[in-house]
């Protein structure tokens, strides 16, 4: 083997050892972890919709081939929703009918929007990014319900 070939091999080997050492150093000494899939982490694995105040909610939505989770969301009228959206597999879209909501669901990223539902009714949403064979079936809905009468108003006081 030629001397320069030996030198090139030796340097390549040394670089490999250096890079591998740097990865081990980052992982062990610096405690830096390789990012995991967002949909495997809380809160995407646990709660999907939870109340954060009298009229405010937080919604953790996951898009995947070919569904949204959750696909039906019931809320009282006047609710403000902090919507966090991510994807489990490939890029999807999220467009809500009659509301100014248009997000992309991107794997490894979380997109956010806040929306208030002032009118009761059904608000359909659908994937608007072609994502494969059943893209056209990927949809869901918000069901915004009229506030039920407060209990105290239905009770006749007995004196
Ligand atoms: Cu998901 Cu199209």
Image (cartoon, rainbow, N blue to C red):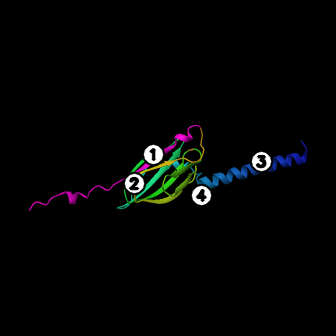
Q: Give the image location of residue 11, x and y in percent.
A: 81, 50
Q: Is residue 17 left or right of residue 78?
A: right
The answer to whether marks 4 and 3 mark residues whose Cβ atoms lie closer than 8 Å is: no
In reply to whether residue 52 is colored magenta, the answer given is no
Closer to the observer: label 4 or label 1?
Answer: 1
Marks 2 and 4 sit apart, C-alpha to C-alpha, by 35 Å
Closer to the observer: label 1 or label 3?
Answer: 1
Query: Which disc is residue 13 wearing?
Result: 3
Instruction: Name which of mark 4 and mark 3 comes first in the sequence.
Output: 3
Task: Specify the segment rendered in magenta.
Answer: 133-159
Instruction: Name which of mark 4 and mark 1 comes first in the sequence.
Output: 4
Q: Give the image location of residue 17, x and y in percent.
A: 72, 49
Closer to the observer: label 2 or label 4?
Answer: 2
Q: Is residue 156 left or right of residue 13?
A: left
Indicate the quadrant containing the N terminus: top left, top right, bottom left or bottom right. top right
Q: Is mark 3 within 8 Å of ligand 1?
A: no
Instruction: Name which of mark 1 and mark 3 comes first in the sequence.
Output: 3
Could you tell me which secondary element the residue under label 4 belongs to? loop
Q: Which residue corresponds to mark 4?
A: 30
Q: Which residue corresponds to mark 2?
A: 50
Marks 4 and 1 sit apart, C-alpha to C-alpha, by 40 Å
Marks 2 and 1 sit apart, C-alpha to C-alpha, by 15 Å
Marks 4 and 3 sit apart, C-alpha to C-alpha, by 24 Å
């Amino acid at each position: 083997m030629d001397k320069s070939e030996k030198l090139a091999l030796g340097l390549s080997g040394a670089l490999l050892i250096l890079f591998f050492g740097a990865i081990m150093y980052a992982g062990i000494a610096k405690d830096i972890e390789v990012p995991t899939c967002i949909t495997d982490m809380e809160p995407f694995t646990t709660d999907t919709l939870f109340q954060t105040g009298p009229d405010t909610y937080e919604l953790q939505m996951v898009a995947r081939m070919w569904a949204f989770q959750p696909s039906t969301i019931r809320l009282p009228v006047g609710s403000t929703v902090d919507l966090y959206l991510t994807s489990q597999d490939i890029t999807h879209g999220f467009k809500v009918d009659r509301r100014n909501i248009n997000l992309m669901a991107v794997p490894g990223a979380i997109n956010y929007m806040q929306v208030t539902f002032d009118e009761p009714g059904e608000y359909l949403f659908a994937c608007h990014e072609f994502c494969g064979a059943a893209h056209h079936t990927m949809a869901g809905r918000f069901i915004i319900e009229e506030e039920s009468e407060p209990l105290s108003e239905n009770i006749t006081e007995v004196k």
